[in-house]
Structures are given as structure tokens and as C-alpha cells.
Image (cartoon, rainbow, N blue to C red):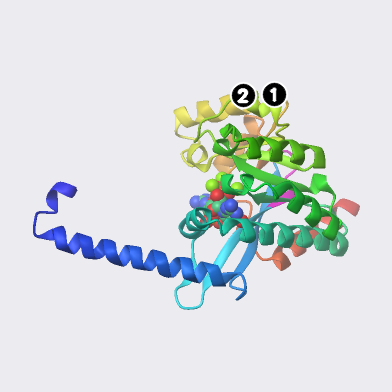
Amino acid sequence: HAKNCGKNNAKLYSSALTTQIMSHVKLEIGLRKALQNNELYLQYQPQIDVPSARLVGVEALLRWRHPEHGMISPDDFIPLAEETGLIVPIGAWVLRTACMQARAWHDECGRAVRVAVNLSARQFKDENLAQTVLAVLEETGLDPRLLELELTEGTLMDDAQATLATLEQLRAIGVYLSIDDFGTGYSSMNYLKRFNVRALKIDRSFISGLPQDSENAAITRAIIAMAHGLKLAVVAEGVETDEQLLLLKQFGCDMAQGYLLGQPSTEEVIGEMLMNTAATATR
Ligand code: C2E
Ligand code: MG
Ligand code: MG
Ligand code: MG
């Protein structure tokens, strides 16, 4: 690709680069104001217990509606939030909002639902993280076991003192920890035991080719067997077809999440799902 961009294109490229840097700066300025301007909000994606098809939890997913540029994907602004450290105040807002919502569902729908919140490695380097989590739980009155924190393999493998201390404090608080995008990073099974992880979330890239892709099927089956051997639950991410769900069921996968089972949705839509399943359960 680079070879095709001859000498004459060098200037073009550098000006494109300038625009890229410019928009990066603009994006950063925008992100600084996004929180106070109420441009950020959460959607919630259902997590289903595979054997019973019951809604057992939701994952909170951050959304940014930019006043001029419209929706900006988390994949585009989360890395920027991490670089700038803005993920710390934004992440605290996500935690508080998700916990308040989980408490409200419990009160309004009469049924407990676990809420999972994504945390980036940068948040673990902030020595106040555990304090923030504790304060949010106290403020909202949410049972710590109804809060799940999704970490990546990279976060667990980071042996910075602050990260280790925070993980220990979170264990003491009693929130659940799960490993997001499992299988895509570096991992150590020792860390899985040591930090009292409750669940592994198999990355979507392993699920998307199922059931045809025999290598990914083997990997998925092996992750489930290993997790169960360690007494960890398994969540499959990105389940889009009935065939994928059927295979995961045959493999003994505990939970599933994906467009087949529910899109990321508003709190009202999740509330209705909870009302319906609460009604079914008491019938
Ligand atoms: P993730 O935590 O792995 O979240 C799952 C992503 O997969 C979400 O993308 C979700 O919308 C998408 N997804 C769910 N089911 C399907 C499916 O069946 N097919 C396909 N193709 N995609 C599916 P989203 O919302 O764009 O978020 C992207 C990533 O941004 C997240 O990946 C997470 O790493 C990060 N993120 C989102 N919200 C937060 C947050 O509040 N804090 C932090 N630190 N990171 C966040
Ligand atoms: Mg996640
Ligand atoms: Mg994931
Ligand atoms: Mg991810």
C-alpha cells in the first residue's frame, strides 16, 4: 500500500495526517465537555443464562452523541479517554449511572439483575478506584454481588503496585470480576485464580465463525473446559445466530450475549424485559 503512494503523494499524506491530528485535538476538546454537556449516556445489553434462556444480567455500554458529528463509537473515543486520563471521571460517571439503574430496576421490576461495567487498565492505575466503587455502592444501596467489573487480560497482567492493591480491595468489597475479550491478550491462569475472577467472556472473534470454523470451535470448547475446571463461569460474546447458540449450549457455555439475544438497549426496554420475565417466573 505505502509503495503505491509515490513521491508526489508525500505532501498529500502529510496534510491528511495534519487533519487527523487536528480532529484528534478537536475530539479531545469535545470529550472534555461531553460529560458536563450530558452528551454521554449508557445502553445496556442483555446477558442470557444459556440453559434457561433467562435474562441474568446486562452490560453497560457507553455512548457519545456529539452535537455536530453525531454518534461516535466507543472504539474511537475510549482510547482517547484513556490517553488523556479522562476515562477516570468518565468511568466514575459510568459506574454511578449503571449502579443507580440496576438499583432502580430492582425496585421497579422486583427482580435483581446484575450490571457489568467495563473498566480500562488506566482506571486501575488510579488509586481511588476501589474507594469510588465503594462510595457508589453505598450511595445506591446496590448489593456488591450485583456489580460486575469487566477487566481485560492486560489489566490483570499489569503488576503495577496500584493495580494489585486495587484488585485486592475490590475482592474485599465483594464485587464480581470478569475477563473481557478473553483469548485475545496475554493471560496467566495463576492470575485467574489469584484475583477471584468469576467469569471469562470469550471474545466475539472466536464466536463469529461458528459453527463452521472448526479451529474456533475447538478454542471455544477448550476455553469452556478450562474455565469450568477452575470453577469459572463462561459468557460467549457476539452471539448472532441460532446455530451459534445451539453449539454453545452443547459445549456447556453458561451465558451468552449478542445481537441474537438482545441489542444494546435503553433502560426502558431492559425494564420491560425484566417485568415480563418477573411475571413469567411468578406464574
Ligand atoms: P466490549 O466490552 O467487548 O463490548 C462488546 C461490544 O460488542 C459492544 O460494542 C457491543 O455493542 C458489541 N456487540 C454485542 N453483541 C454483538 C454482536 O452480536 N455482534 C457484533 N458485531 N457486536 C456485538 P461497543 O458498544 O461499540 O463497545 C466497544 C468497546 O468499547 C467495548 O467492548 C469496551 O471495550 C469499550 N467500552 C464500552 N463502554 C465502555 C465503558 O463504559 N468504559 C470502558 N472503559 N470501555 C467501554
Ligand atoms: Mg465488555
Ligand atoms: Mg468484549
Ligand atoms: Mg472490548
- Where are the magenta residues, as a range? 50-58
Quarter the C terminus occupies: bottom right
Q: Residue furthest right?
A: 282
Query: Which residue is pictured at 15% across the width and 58% down the height?
Result: 10
Above or below residue 202? Residue 138 is: below
Q: Residue 230 carries which label?
A: 1
Q: Residue 189 carries which label?
A: 2
Is the C-beta separation of discs 2 and 1 under 8 Å?
yes
Query: Badge 1: how crowded within 10 Å, few (<14), some, or many (20+)?
Result: some
Q: Which sits earlier in the primary sequence, circle 2 or circle 1?
A: 2
The percent position of residue 235, horizontal first and vertical second, equals: 64, 39
- Disc 2 residue type? Met
Above or below residue 12? Residue 238 is: above
The percent position of residue 197, horizontal first and vertical second, equals: 70, 33
Report the number of numbered marks. 2
Helix, strand or loop status at disc 2: helix
The percent position of residue 181, horizontal first and vertical second, equals: 55, 40
| Residue closest to the eye, 113 or 51 | 113
Helix, strand or loop status at disc 1: loop
Q: Does the magenta stretch include residue 124?
A: no
Q: Does the magenta stretch include residue 56?
A: yes
> In the figure, is residue 179 to the left or right of 96?
left
The percent position of residue 1, horizontal first and vertical second, equals: 19, 48
> In the figure, is residue 223 to the left or right of 266?
left
Image quarter of residue 192: top right
Query: Which residue is pictured at 45% across the width and 67% down the height?
Result: 27
